[in-house]
Image: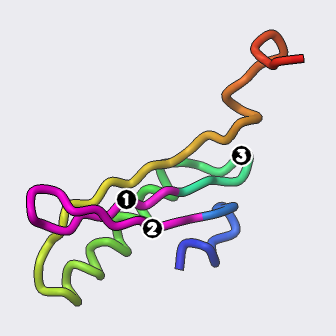
């Protein structure tokens, strides 16, 4: 559902075993100019719907990545 959002360039979900329980990591790459707080709110609503469908609340980490072009400025790039 997140990949259908025009503000999201890419999204991926990974599962992990943490102390005998399943945990999710949701990685989201927003498009340039997208509002991260709105993307986080959409992801939170999707996680809440998943919790209701499963009948339990697994641990979830929502990670919103900035992307390479935003992390490095001209001086930080390797030439």
Q: Disc 1 versus disc 2: distance between alpha carbons?
A: 6 Å
Tell me residue 20's x, y (percent).
9, 64
List the single residue furthest toward the right.
79
In this figure, which residue is indicated by the disc labeled 3?
A: 33
Q: Disc 2 versus disc 3: distance between alpha carbons?
A: 23 Å
Q: Is mark 1 on a helix, strand or loop?
A: strand
**In the image, residue 3 above or below residue 14:** below
Q: In which quarter of the image is residue 61?
A: bottom left
Estimate how packed mark 3 is, as few (under 14), some (14 to 19) or many (20 or more) residues with alpha carbons within 10 Å.
few
Q: Disc 1 versus disc 3: distance between alpha carbons?
A: 23 Å
Residues shaded magenta? 11-27
**In the image, residue 78 above or below residue 24:** above
In the picture, measured across the screen, residue 74 lies left or right of residue 68, that is: right
Tell me residue 67's x, y (percent).
67, 41
In this figure, which residue is indicated by the disc labeled 2?
A: 13
Q: Which residue is drawn at 50% across and 48% down?
A: 64
Q: Which of marks 1 and 3 is nearer the N terminus?
A: 1
Q: Earlier in the sequence, mark 1 or mark 2?
A: 2
**Contact between labelled residues 3 and 2, with CB atoms less than 8 Å apart:** no
Q: Residue at x 74, y 47 (%)?
A: 32
Q: Which residue is drawn at 12% across and 86% down?
A: 55
Q: Which of marks 2 and 3 is nearer the N terminus?
A: 2
Figure label count: 3
In this figure, which residue is indicated by the disc labeled 1?
A: 25
The nearer-to-camera label among 2 and 3 is: 2
Tell me residue 21's x, y (percent).
12, 66
Estimate how packed mark 1 is, as few (under 14), some (14 to 19) or many (20 or more) residues with alpha carbons within 10 Å.
some
């Amino acid at each position: 559902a997140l990949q259908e959002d025009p503000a999201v360039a890419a999204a991926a979900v990974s599962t992990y075993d943490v102390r005998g329980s399943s945990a999710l990591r949701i990685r989201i790459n927003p498009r340039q100019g997208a509002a991260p707080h709105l993307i986080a709110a959409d992801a939170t609503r999707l996680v809440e719907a998943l919790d209701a469908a499963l009948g339990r609340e697994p641990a979830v980490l929502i990670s919103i990545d900035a992307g390479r072009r935003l992390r490095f400025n001209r001086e930080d790039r390797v030439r």
